[in-house]
Every structure is written in C-alpha cells, then in structure tokens.
Image (cartoon, rainbow, N blue to C red):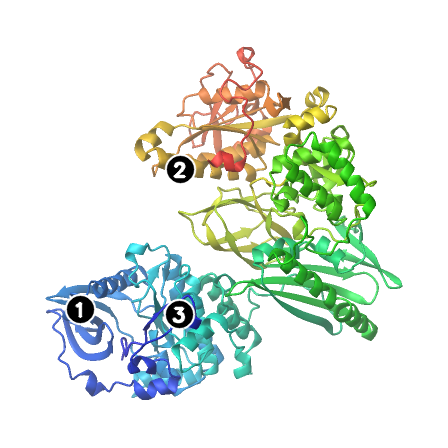
Amino acid sequence: MLPFAKNDETNVLPAVPDIVDATYATSCDELVKIQPTDARNANHNESPAARNIAPLPNLGDRYRPLKKLGQGGMGAVYLAEDTLDCRKVAIKVLPAEFNLDQQAVQRFQKEMRMLSEVQHPNVANLLDSGVFGDTRFIVMEVVEGTDLKAVLQRHMPIPERVALEIIADVANALAVAHSIGIVHRDIKPANILLSAISADGESRDDAVMNAVLDSQPLTAKLTDFGLARHVDQGASMELTRTGMMLGTPYYISPEQCTDKGGITPAADIYSLGATLFELLTGRPPFLADDPIRLITMHCFDPAPDPRKIAPEIGDGVAAIVLKTLQKSPEARYADAAHFLQDLDSLLQGEVHSAEVHPHLPVTTGKVFEANWEWQLDGDPKDLWPHISNTERVNAAVGLPPVEYMTRRDEAGNKHRIGSFKLGWTRLSWEEHPFEWIEGRRFSILREFENGPFQWFVSTVELTPRAGGGSLLRHNVRIAARGLMGRLIAHIEVNIKGQKPLDRVYRRIDNVVCGRLSGSTITDPFVSVAPPAASVRKKLESYRERLSGDITDQSSLDKFLDVLAEGSPQDLARIRPRAMARQLGVAPDQLTNICLAACHAGLLELHWDILCPTCRVAAAVKDTLCEIDRHANCEACEHNFDVDFSSSVEMIFRIHPEIRQADLKTYCIGGPEHAPHVIAQIQIEVGEKFELDLNLDRGSYILRGTQLPYTIGIVAETTSGTNRLLIPLSPGQSKRRPACVHAGRQLITLVNEYQHPLLVRLERTTSRADVVTATEALKLPVFQQLFPSETITRERISSVATSTLLALRITNVLDLFADLGDSATVDEMAREIQAFQVTIESYEGKLIKEQDDRLLASFPTARQAIQAGLTLNQHNMESHSKAGTRIQVAIHRGVTMSTSLNGKLDYFGRSIAVASAMLNTSERHLLIVSQDLASDEDCNTQLTEAQKSLRPVSTNGVGRIFEICDSSPGDDRVRTAGPATAELHSIDTLQNDTTLQFDATPLKSGSEAQA
C-alpha cells in the first residue's frame, strides 16, 4: 500500500551565505537522515505494529481510517475508506495540537492549494479536503505499491531504461507544475511512488520490485507538495523563515543551500538529476557524513561523471545527467518540459537536443579532435563580446588574413569561398555560416576544396560557474586527408594553436576583470607596442590644434591615447559611440571630437552601407553623394533600398600619415558583426531545434534569408508562456507577435521546408552604438564642418512611392477613467511595443510617433494591408477585455524626407492624407484610401483573405473604404472599381505633417516607451 508520509526526510537547515564559517546543530535523529541509503534503511524502518499503537483519528462519517501508513514531522498519513463509494484513499492529517502553530497550518493549507492546481496522472492527486472538529485533513488517491526509496534499498542500481522511464513520469508531472509557476522543492526517491500490475498471489510491493528487475511497465507518481511554492510567490506568502533552507541534503540544489536569489524550476531539475544519478549508480552524486560538508559539495564540487561509477551508462544518458547537475541554474534545463524532450528522445532512440551544431559533412577516415578548458574569472556576459570577436582573436593568435569571394554553383546557389596561405600551399574552403547563441556558444564549419583537410569545425562555449566566473571550452575537430593530414592537424592545432589561444583568452579575462591597467586604453587581445616618438609628437601637435574647439580636455586626452596605443585593427573602423562606451565618456562629446579630428586631418570620414538584414557592411563610401539608392549584400543575398536613418553608418579611420590601420580581413560573419542578433542557427530539413534563451523585456523578430515572412516575439514581465513551438513552413501565414514571459524561455523551431534554413533571432531596438547618416546630419558640428555632406533636393524628389499605415488608439480617455493614469501609461506602452513588432515583422518602418498615434512606411501595399489585417485582430481581442482599441488607415503615395532645420523629417501630401484619414469615425476600424481600393492586386489580396470593401464618408480627403469581413449575400463590394474621383479636397491639405503629427523627429525605442 501507500507509504505516503513515512519518516520525514526533509531537513530544515540554517542557510549560511558563507558556508566555511557556518555551524550546524541538529539532533541525532536528523543526523541519521543524511547517512548513505543502507544506513537510512537500518535506522528508520517503522514497523506496522508501531504505526498502529496510536488510536486512529475521527474524520467524521464519510472517511473511515483503516490503518496508519506513515508519520512525518507535521502529521501522519492513513489508509482510509470513502464510505460513499467504498474506495480506498490516503488521508494526510494535521493533528489538533498543530492548530496553534500558524506556520504549520499555513503550510498544510498551501500543500492543499498546490495539489488542487497540479492535477495529473503522474501525481498523487487531491480528491478532497476538510476539517472535522479540530482535525484538518487532505484526501488523496492511494497508490498501491511502494516508493522509489524502498526500491533502492533492495535493488541498487536499477536498469537504465527503467530509471529513465521513472524519471520521465516524474518530469511529466513537474512539467504541468512548472507551466503554472509551481516549484516542488523536494524531489527525492521517497516522494516518488511506484505501482505495477501484480500477478495472482503477488503483493503490490513485490509487483513493483519484479517490474523493476524485469523492465516491465511501471507507473510513477509524484507526491508531497508540502514545500512547493509559486515562482513569483511574494514574501508575505513564503513560509520559510529567513535564513532557513528547505530540502533534502542528498538532492538539494545549490541555490536552495543559501538565501541568495530566487528558486526557479531549475532547482527541481537539479534534484531530479540527483535522483536519476542515484538510480543509475546506486548512490547520490555527493556523499558525506557531515551536513555542512555535503552542502558545500553541492555548492562548489563538480558533479562526478556517472560513467566513472557505472561504466555501462550510455553517453547520451550521462550527458543529460551532467547537464541537470550544473551548479548554475542557467546551465541546466529551463524546466521539466525542456528536460522531458531529451528524455523522450533517448527513450525513442533519437539524438537529443544537445546534438552538436553545425551538422558535420560525411567523413572518410578518423577525425582529429582537440579539447581545451579555461577557468576564467570574468562573467560570460562580459567575456562574450571579446571571445566571440573572431576577427580580432584570429589575428591575435597569428592566423593569416583571409581572402573571400562569392561563387555560384550550377543551380545558381551562392557559396562564400575563403582562402589563405598555409605553409607552402594556398588552402581554399567553403565558409558555412556561423552558428551561435549569444553569451553561450558559437561555432564555424569550413569544408576544404584542397590541401590536407576535408573539413574543420571550431566550437567555443562559455558556461557560468556557480561561485562566479566562467568555464570556457574550446573544441576543434578536423577531418584530415591521410596520415600527413593528421600530422599537420596536430602541429597546427596542438603545437601552434594552443599556446596563442591560452595567451589571448587569459589576456581577455585579465582586461575584463581589471587586472591590466596603466593606460587609458588596454587592448583585450594583444599587447600593443608603445607608439613611436614621432607619432606622439604628431598627436601632441593635434592636441594643441583641437584644444581650442574641444571643451572636455579629459575626453580629448583619452581619445588621443586610443589613437596612440590602440590596435591597428580597431583604428581601421572607429565608431564614436562604441569608443565612448569603452572610454567611459559622453557619446555626443566623443562624436564631436571625431568630427573635429577628421576636419583637422587626424582621421578620415567614411560611410558604411549596412545590410538591414544581417547588419554587415555591404559597401564603404567616402561621401554621402557617392551612395546609391540601392545596394546588394552578398553575405545574405539581399537587395535593399539604402535608408539614411538605418542603413548608413558614420565611421572614421586614422589617417595613414599618423598610423597605418590594419585593413585586412581575418574572419567574416561572426557574432561580432551582428551584435543585434541573439541567435543564428542553420536548421536541417525536418529538424527540431531548441533555443534555450534568456530574453529581457522587449521586442524581437525571427527571420531568415530563405523565409518570405518574419515572426515577431514580445517578451513581457507580466504575461506569456516560457515555451514556444514555431513551425517554419512554406504555408506559414502571418500572425500577431507571440508573447513570452521575460526571463528564461525555450523556443522550439521546426524546419518543414525541403531545404535547410538559416534563421536568426534579432532585437528590434536600434543599436545605441551606431551614428547613422540621419543622426550625423542633425549634428551642428557636422553641419558646420562638412557643409557639402547633405541630402540633395534632387535626390529627395525621386524617392519611390511607399505605402503608409497610420494608427490611432481610440479609447485613451476611457482607459484613463477605468485604469488610472499609471496603469494606462503602462498599458499603452505595452501595446505600442506590440504594434511596432507587428509593423516590423512585415518589413515596415516606424517613421513618426506622437501621443496616441503611429505612422509607418511599408515597401509594398501588400505588406501594409497584411499588417493592417493583423493589427485589426487586436480589436477583436480587446472587446473581451479592458484593453486598447485602435483605428488603422492605409494610404499609398509619394513621401519625401530631408534634413529640415537640422533634423531628418518626413513630409508631403501623402503624410497629411494618411493622418487626416484618422479623423474618420472610430467605428470604422480598418480603412484604405481610393488609390488602394481601386488597385487590382490589393483587391485580390482582400479576396484571398475573405474581406470586402465598403465605402464610408470622405471626411475631406476623398473616398475612403472600410475593410470588412465577407459573408454570403452581403451587399458590400469586393472591389472598389477603377478610380472615378480624385481626392477632391486634397489641395486643402498642407505639404507638411502639422495636421495630426507635429514635426518632432521619431523618438528612439527607449524614449518612445517612457
């Protein structure tokens, strides 16, 4: 029967931040609880006779206790009969003497609440609860069998597949709990109940034991939610006393050992992993006869590899166990559902989600491999920008510069070909795209066309250490051609490669941790030789020339020190705001210094043409007038319109008469080229790939060069799930942005195309370290020093026609009345952020924002209408809750932009028309102008979407049509027909934006949310 509440193993230990100085006091009884399993068995088997000495409690007429099953610290569990249907149940009773203990009562009631929320076949579910007299009780289903602890006392270890199936059952139960924010906090064998089908004459206990030995079907159920809590539970609800630690020492997670930080589902993953470790090896991962020593091992000692104790354990199983036992919660599985996917893959014989990326080519012969590890003191987030800067790292370790070219195959597919000279030969290879997850891992695959190697893969991983710092792993694999190839691989990697990497990685760590100083600028990659006396003399003369124009002499001194001591690679592309952040000076001040230095001849001014998709410089121009209206990015095979507000960046280069900049290329396409990209992954046909992420609150876009659509994702602090399944298929339709909870997320991508997909998850906010041409044109110093660098009227007058989408929140006053000022501001900020993600997911660009209105521009009318249809779904959802309601107006026409009064602004008749359309009655939710209504392609699009057009009042801007749902027999027109009337009153509108939008330039993302 059910040994539900046996002798309670849960220890309440003092949580001490400094374990070294901790003291521990406990009774002899508690010390027994952390002995090895056989010792626990010897001291804590309460006999059935002893259990039934005390009288059975009176629980009223319905429930009749039959016998006592077990005793815990806060009550007992009885087998009882429900007199309504004569079925057996398990009843947990809180004795009357605990009624005066408010904390005991609250914990008992909390366990009842938690059980009521987690109803699952793998949980000992709640059936009823009540109070009879002074006795409180909880009624649960009875499990006929035994617990996992008892199994381990008789059979250690247990078969691998049986162990995985038991843990998978528990993970199924935990997945439900975790999905609603509940953490169990006391996963251990004693809280896992097992049942099996028994043969004639076989006891339930023996049935379980035999099923374990014979690998027969078992059912596991998780019980005892007495320590469970919600992840976001407030302090007022937390029943653990300050400075106390809850859990069972053999299975407790490191974060439960101290009072630092919150407890997340990853704590249950650790305890579940410790339990799996014991099932597979016959012992917990850590053993000690002293509680403090045991806790110290959980916090600081690496978990042993289970294969060293039981060599028969499979590699895939061992990998999963070790991942669950990582010290840092971020390094484990995010939650039980994440863990369960790898368990299921193992049980089904599939490769689990820890499969190595990139996918390797077919190999003939043995693969050479080198693995290195570094224990670094810097945090992963601080080390990542430098470790992932493959351009600088490759140069620092002494690799030769690379020449790149693009080549097409017979099918017309582009291939990026790289080459450099190695020894006596020039090696050529196909460069596959980098794959990375920001802050954690990146890798690169090269397939060689000639030379001693078939292919080469380099993978770098950063993992946080529990006590602070990072573990850096670098793995190199090379498929060599013959014995000579293996010899060359050994020489190039182990002899020539390891020491330079060690030097560079340790220097990066020293710089990040502040252990290298002595100058204003310390290069993280190489030790730069002191500048020659002639360079110092030239820079000093420039200092005297610039001092009269620069008020901040300290910033000027730091800037000149960079020019004297900076690396030649960094001086080839000086980005003022990025340098300002590095030097700790004001970005605007350093930008003005760079402009003044350029005017004086110390620097050269250039303009990078940035691809809007991959953000790599597609070209470099010396002046604005050289920039064409269209450009092509070979890296992602993308043709794009050059936008001065986003595609053109102002950069500087040191003048060659001062110092020679290093203009050579050592690597392309790495994470350092795309800091706005959180993850880039190549997904094979039919593959499921899991992105384990930590997205802060904000807006993101999933895109791919082979995808004809984008997918918006919004991370919120107040709503959303932490799991997403996103199929990528040819039949994918546009949808509203998916909402996830900010923090940790698991996003599963499925490639349903018939070819591999390269996908990227990007931040939608503009990079704060970029000075665009638009911003440069606004600067008074730029206008004064470079009057010839302007956008000409001739250029503006030929801007192509674009489609405008105007949006207005129509119930602002109602929101203020219903929600109050603060809640309304928060609500509008959230909604505007979601609107912006939708606009950007259809390749729209926000060009104006003011109060309750937005104005966006789209390359095509189809994209604008599709965005409008998606936004209109918002109204359908808002009617069922107290949310914002919007009106959307779409118009097509010529828009113009220019630097007006020092600001880049958009103006013209089309801007005014789109704005004025929002004066139409707010009951018309989605409206379009005559130009779009009479367009054949737009009407076809609406027909496909089962929409029709209905004329509404002109409101002074010509004929306006509302987009409505089509229904059989209605009298609305599917097409507005050819244009029969021009916008008759359009001449009354001004050629500026003062009608509804003032001339204030578009705010930045942070300003717009304020």
Query: Quarter of the image containing the N terminus?
Result: bottom left
Q: Position of residue 948 (x, y in %)?
A: 48, 29
Element on which disc 3 rests: helix
Amino acid carrying label 1: it is: Phe
Question: Quick one: 839 or 268, which is closer to the camera?
Answer: 268
Q: Residues within 10 Å of mark 2 (few under 14, many from 20)?
A: some
Q: In the displayed structure, does residue 454 sit left or right of residue 4?
A: right
Q: Does residue 945 lie above or below 530 as drawn?
A: above
In the rendered image, which residue does mark 1 sit on? Answer: 98
Q: Within the image, what quadrant is residue 901 found in? A: top right
CB within 8 Å, label 3 to label 2? no
- Residue closer to the observer: 650 or 330: 650
Of badges 3 and 1, the one in the foreground is 1
What's the CA distance linking mark 1 and mark 2?
46 Å
Where residue 848 sits: x, y (%)? 54, 28
Q: Which mark is residue 170?
A: 3
Can residue 72 be seen by looking at this rendering? Answer: yes
Q: Is residue 975 left or right of residue 356?
A: left
Tag in front: 3 or 2: 2
Question: Which mark is first along the chain, 2 or 3?
Answer: 3
Q: Residues within 10 Å of mark 3 (few under 14, many from 20)?
A: many
Q: Is residue 437 visible?
A: no
Q: Which residue is mark 2?
A: 827
Q: Earlier in the sequence, mark 1 or mark 2?
A: 1
Instruction: Identify the amino acid type marked 2.
Output: Glu
Q: Residue at x 72, y 72 (%)?
A: 367
